[in-house]
Image (cartoon, helix red, strand yellow):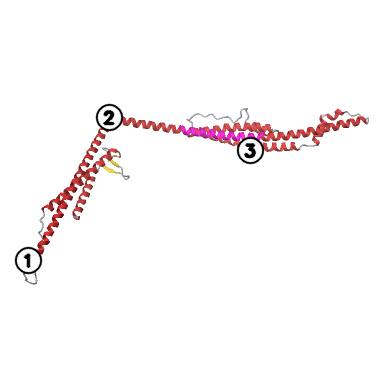
Amino acid sequence: MRKQWSILFSLIFAYALFAQAENPKLGRTESGKAFRIDSEGNKVVDYIADLESNVEGLQRQVQGLEDELREKVRIIENLQEGRSGQDRIVEKDLVDNSARFADTNFAQSRQIEQASDAASNSAKSQLNFECERTDAIRRAEIASLQDKIKLLEDENSSLSSRLKDPSTTAMLNSRFDMDSQEGDDNRRNLDNSKAQILSLEDEIRMTDERISQLKDELEVKRQEYALLEKEIDSLNKTENFVLKSEDNAVNEAKRGTSEGKSFDSRASLKPDFLTTNKYSYPSKAESDRLQALESLKGSVSTEFNQVKSIISKRDNMLKDYKSQHKTSVAFNPSKPCSSNGDNLRSLHSRLERAQSIDDLSNVKKSLREIETKMNDDIALMQRLKSLP
């Protein structure tokens, strides 16, 4: 029985190989997807190839089941045609010619033969029942597979006819064109979104710079306010000193008049007299104001050098842009000057001659305007370079 099943499996495997070699236009890729070879020799991976591959697999299963059924029918027919009891066991007395055991040995042999026939008949009946039951199951499976094959063939035929229909081809081409147009629109929208993001980033950066500029201006105003408080305090002290000097001069004039001396009390109130008394006692507030003025001048000088570097950077980027984008969008750079017409040369001169905090504040404000213009030019050139 084991040998028969081995023969059956060998036949099924040989048929599968033959079926695979029979249709070289179907196959599967390394990833397991079904493909077919069209009239031009190209591998096409689509739904039709999957259907044809499934149909071919189902046909091989049907053929294997039919071969298995024929093999089992052949086994049943061989068992039904076989004769039972052909090989009888005969016991002979080779040593003694005693005849009294002959009948006993014959009866025992007959019993063994009957038992063997009964066991063989039972096995045949059981085998016939199993074969009939298996045959019915296999026939039902074959019918079901044939129905599936018929459905798949009808579906394949319907798809083939639809693909050959010009209206279907036109619809598919139209859908493909629509998908391509949608893809182009999405790419343009993506490019526009990127440009908007770059613009927003530039606006955020300029806002941050403006916030930093306002913070610096606030700090300058605080310093100015502190210096003004010191100046007010110094002026108050000077005024008190002058008033005391005037009182002393008036008292001296009164004493001189009483002693017969001619003394003009108004002479003590002349400017040269007050100036002499003022410079005779220098104010510490004035020294602090000059020191703060020098510190602020150093800060503005540093910012002047930074703006000068930014202008140089803008000029280099402009030179590269003009050499690489001769046919691109025209770009008009901003002039490195403030709203009141100050450029780097005039601002440098004003910085050197500055004698008050207001002078330095005006220079700083002009530098910030020029810096903002240069940064705007740099950001605009970067956006233009990123465009396709």
Say the numbered circle drawn on residue 103.
1
Q: Quadrant of the C terminus?
A: top left
Q: Total of numbered circles in the picture?
A: 3
> Does the magenta segment cover residue 204?
yes
Q: How busy is the neighbourhood of tag 2: few (under 14 within 10 Å), some, or many (20 plus)?
A: few
Along the line of sight, the residue nearer the viewer: 208 or 36: 208
Mark-to-mark CA distance, 3 and 2: 77 Å
Q: Residues within 10 Å of mark 1 (few under 14, many from 20)?
A: few
Give the foreground label among 1 and 3: 1
Q: Are marks 1 and 2 in contact (CB under 8 Å)?
A: no
The residue closer to the viewer here, 122 or 128, is 122
Residue 302 image label: 3
Say whether disc 1 or disc 3 marks the residue closer to the N-terminus. 1
Question: Where is residue 366 shown, x and y percent of the image?
Answer: 62, 31
Residues 78 and 356: in front is 78
- Disc with the residue nearer the chain's start (3 vs 2): 2
Residue that label 2 marks: 166
Along the horizontal axis of the image, is 290 left or right of 160? right
From which residue to which does the magenta span run?
192-221
As shown in the figure, which amino acid type bears the numbered disc 2? Answer: Pro
- Mark in front: 3 vs 2: 2
Q: Is residue 352 left or right of residue 183?
A: right
Q: Secondary structure at mark 2?
A: helix
Q: Residue at x 40, y 32 (%)?
A: 184
Residue 72 image point, x, y percent: 17, 50
Residue type, mark 3 in image: Thr
N-terminal of the pair, mark 1 or mark 2, is 1
User: Which residue is at 13% across, 57% downward?
Assistant: 118
**In the drawing, does residue 299 fall left or right of residue 236?**
left
